[in-house]
Image: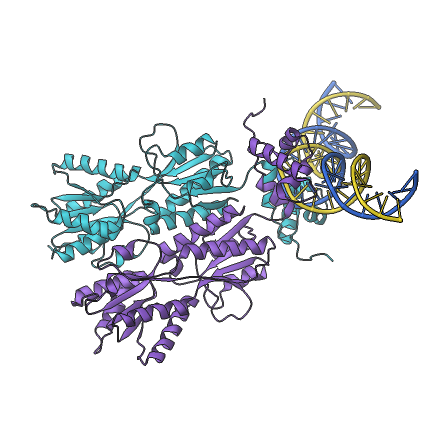
Chain colours: A purple, B cyan, C yellow, D blue
Amino acid sequence: MRQPRARAGIKQVAAEAGVSVTTVSHALNGKGRLPDETRQRVRRVADRLGYKPNATARNLVVGKTGLLGIAVSQQGGPPSAVTDFAYFAQLMMAASTEAIANGYALVLAPAESALDPHAGIAVDGAIVVDPVSDDPLVHELRDAGIAVVSTGRVPGSDEPACWVDNDHVAATRSMLDHLSRRGGRRIALLTSPAEISYTFDVELAYRSWCEQHGIAPCVKQSAPDLTERAGYAAASELLALPEPPDAIFATYDRLAFGTLLAAETRGVRVPDDLLLATTATESQAPEQASPSLTTLDLHPQEIGRGAASLLVDLLDGREPDQPHLLVPHRVVARSSTRRAR
Amino acid sequence: MRQPRARAGIKQVAAEAGVSVTTVSHALNGKGRLPDETRQRVRRVADRLGYKPNATARNLVVGKTGLLGIAVSQQGGPPSAVTDFAYFAQLMMAASTEAIANGYALVLAPAESALDPHAGIAVDGAIVVDPVSDDPLVHELRDAGIAVVSTGRVPGSDEPACWVDNDHVAATRSMLDHLSRRGGRRIALLTSPAEISYTFDVELAYRSWCEQHGIAPCVKQSAPDLTERAGYAAASELLALPEPPDAIFATYDRLAFGTLLAAETRGVRVPDDLLLATTATESQAPEQASPSLTTLDLHPQEIGRGAASLLVDLLDGREPDQPHLLVPHRVVARSSTRRAR
DNA sequence: TCCTCTTGGAAAGACGTTTTTGCAAACGCT
DNA sequence: AGCGTTTGCAAAAACGTCTTTCCAAGAGGA
């Protein structure tokens, strides 16, 4: 007794359309030499039967696995990409959506070993989020011949590589300009010791901006764990300086939330005594803080989508004209930098 | 010119071991009739060559996709599972690890449509995190003949189903006992309006416990978005009552963080005037709060691991003796319930 | 000795596609 | 009319594994 529920295969479509399976395959994939009339007819039949090619069979014949890996955990230390959860979640969701739309599946690699060709799961390509300097995972994957796209660049590496990133230098300058326009005179940078291109770029841009504007740079690094508590501690030290800053740009929103608390504890009013700005995912937290926080929106969805898209292009042999993708940023001004005149 | 890098296939192993591919397959999979001597020899050769069966080919012949989906977004409203992200991330990582260990890949389904048999990606089974009452996604998947395991139960559903969960009733009672022992007399429950089995279980257990202990129940629901801000607002209302509670159990850690802030704002000291406890992932946030928060550890990794394991058992035809799995909990007492005598 | 039963292992088919090759028919040119 | 070229499509091989079927050799019994 047959299962009547069996999905239609290419053979059923061929039989129904009165052609061979070859013709069906060619018609659906735009290959071969077929008159438009036949192509259309086959497509109509396929639609009617709800035909979807079996991905496993297709992968087998084209020699792929159909899987993309996304690696999240840096070696050692607190995994910052995962700590900054909202950012990572949005990046990953968008990447997964894009992968599926292109016939791939995005699988989460909980540890490095998951993508190890000998130990783990075989993937066609991988996305590495915020690689650290000389990231061993990136090397390992490259050596294994697996295509890699990183979000954020591999710091200090000159080798040609594919990445998707914001223009953090320009973004930082935009935000510093904003703080300056809003009256900030002694603008401090509150950042983390993470060794990723993001923090490097921001600090570099900050120092260069300060030099151009004749402002003495003031950089404070928080503890490596990206918690509000770490932000609280670091901000408290900043505010206890003999000449405390009158504006702070925090590189992670959690640091900013901690700063908010530190200011409140010390009776420092935001924005009257202190301008505060940070980066943002599309989460609502900065908007709902009190006062609402001015943010630099970095559009992690676009980063994730772009990374997956770039990777798919690579794998499908569509050499992208640009191996890099810059995602735009946007300064969203809110109460924390709106000072009464 | 051949690629010398080509992975060893079953044919190479067969040639090297001087047997047929059939024998290799049987030896490696424990099928067929072979003397132990042959089995061992073949295995040794396979190890030496680093042979790993091609998952795609295997899946094709056994008629599987090798993919498990994990659905994260509930329909409408703010996706609580994702908002409470540390919990979800840990659950998912553990599930992915377990899936890979069993030869499956876990793919993230960013939206319901991703698992739609007609529109999305074909999976062998799915994990649905915290289904809502009468969850449409669960039904859809079941109707499509896809095995489903949920973390948390489908509220109000009687149909036999596979799930992994904590014993939230027992866990809640443990925590309430703890608060009572530490001097709580008017213990309030701060929870969210999410329609998932977790919140239902906790509220039910709370009311029953109150009745048994002759305490008037006091349940406060926060706004549906699980932010610290929502916790702040709801806790503020609680503390403004004519007879405010002297202990609060918050069902999400963010609500507790908001409560901490509300208490500080109103000059209510924790733990001296107010005992505070909440649930926890393995994140460090509650431990690092000030004061450190007493938590109910729910071990989301175990939930994720268990769900994946159960699903794999189902798919591989190993009917589990128990379609349910209860993950243990643990009360971790910290400063927020340590009242000076 | 002949027959049957067990054991060890090989051959071949199947899974559902894509891709390569091949073959007619139609067409255009001289 | 004869010949090369295009056009439209089909047949068949291939992808790498698992599974079923089948055969030969040896063991045991009558």
Which residue is depicted at the point 56% across and 47% down?
A66
Q: Position of residue B335 (x, y in %)?
A: 20, 56
Number of numbered discs: 0
Q: Position of residue A82 (x, y in %)?
A: 39, 56
User: Could one spot residue B36 in this view of the protein?
Assistant: no
Q: Position of residue A115 (x, y in %)?
A: 52, 54
Which residue is depicted at the point 59% across and 55% down?
A318
User: Could one spot residue A275 in this view of the protein?
Assistant: yes
Which residue is depicted at the point 23% across and 52% down?
B229
C24 to A184, vertically: above or below: above
Q: Position of residue A49 (x, y in %)?
A: 57, 31
Q: Nearer the viewer, residue B95 or A315?
A: A315
Query: Quadrant where the N terminus of chain A lies?
Result: top right
Q: Is B205 positioned to the left or the right of B23 in the image?
A: left
Q: Is A270 positioned to the left or the right of B154 in the image?
A: left
- Dividing the picture into quadrants, the one containing residue A44 is top right
- Dividing the picture into quadrants, the one containing residue B265 is bottom left
Q: Is A187 positioned to the left or the right of A15 in the image?
A: left
Q: Is B145 positioned to the left or the right of B267 in the image?
A: right
A194 to A40, vertically: above or below: below
Query: Quadrant where the C terminus of chain A lies?
Result: bottom left
B68 to A126, vertically: above or below: above
